[in-house]
Image: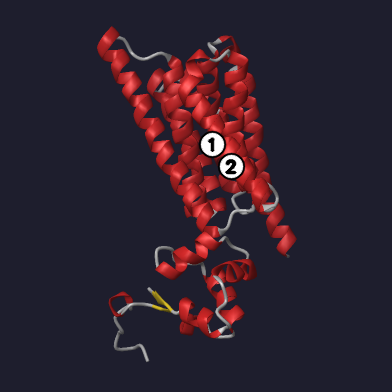
Amino acid sequence: MKVNSSIIKALWLLVIVLLVMGGRAMPMPLLIALLLIVFFAPIIREFRPQTDLDERQLQISHLSSHISFYVFIALTVLVMLKDYIGKGQNPPPYLYMLLLIPLLVKLLISVYQNYDPRRVAFWIGYGWLGVWALFIVLSHGISPEALIELTPFLAVIVLAVLFRKKILISGVLFIVFAIGLSLFFRGWLRLDLYVRLLMYALVPLPLLISGIVLIWNYAEGRKTK
Amino acid sequence: MKNRIRYYRHINNEMTQQALAEAVKVTRQTIIAIEKGSFNPSVRLALKMAHVFGVTVEELFQLDEEELPKKTESSP
């Protein structure tokens, strides 16, 4: 067993070395296959039903991933700066996507791990709805048009406040609103793929996650009763 | 944090690091790191190690003097 695991580790390292040394010269399908191996092998090892890593190995794995994340962000910013200095234009959308989606994921995980998930789900829900309401007021001013556009947001906020104690209802409400928004903004499907990913990650995703967390909490609460 | 793992391994028939690692289901490198003081084990792992030697966690691990929190007047 130990020998097998050493062979697997050695092969994995070999794949990384191959990628670093010959990545640019490789045919695309081979490059993608090797990248998938390099990316998924440690994840599978860490998250399969019962990890074979002990607590120190997990700590090392998490620290290395954490540092890699900051390196990734720093490199993306460097590319954005180089683009801006070289061409005098704002960077292309895929760079924003590469920068913002991982930051959003980190933010959501950190907040949910740090505080009571139920409370955070409400913060995100209210915060998100508040930001959009503000956005509407800023773009239309205080006018009948803004009031009409604000109605669904205000309705969801009021309902969520009313059903604050009923987390199942609040969770369903957030999910329905997130799906509704996705349908409302279906025009985004015509946008560039990277912009689309960014918009869906920034707009309905936080609400959707909040809804799922609330329903999850409800189910957990029932299980412990 | 100080530890007496080396001592307890010694008085337990020179138990090897590998044997201890297998008993508590971690790698030998983790035992080495704990013995050297470069890795602090979780409470769960510390309890498991203490159980293997038949001692309490306090007998196996001790905080250095400067790491101990200052006692307040209300504390016993």
Task: Give me the residue at 53% from left, 40% from top.
Answer: A125
Task: Give me the residue at 57% from left, 32% from top.
Answer: A38
Residue A210 in sight here:
no
Q: Quadrant of the N terminus of chain B?
A: bottom left
Circle number at residue A9: 2
Residue A94 in sight here:
yes
Residue at the bottom extreme, as displayed: B76
Q: Which residue is mark 1?
A: A13
Q: Are marks 2 and 1 on the same chain?
A: yes
As measured in the structure, the alpha-carbon distance from the residue carrying label 2 to the one carrying label 1 is 6 Å
Q: Quadrant of the C terminus of chain B?
A: bottom left
Q: Residues within 10 Å of mark 2 (few under 14, many from 20)?
A: some
Of residue A1 and residue B38, the one placed in the foreground of this image is A1
Residue B32: x and y in percent read 47, 65
Query: What chain does mark 2 sit on?
Result: A
Q: Residues within 10 Å of mark 1 (few under 14, many from 20)?
A: few
Q: Amino acid at mark 1?
A: Leu
Of residue B20 and residue B68, the one placed in the foreground of this image is B20
Q: Quadrant of residue A75?
A: top left
Labels 2 and 1 touching (C-beta < 8 A): yes
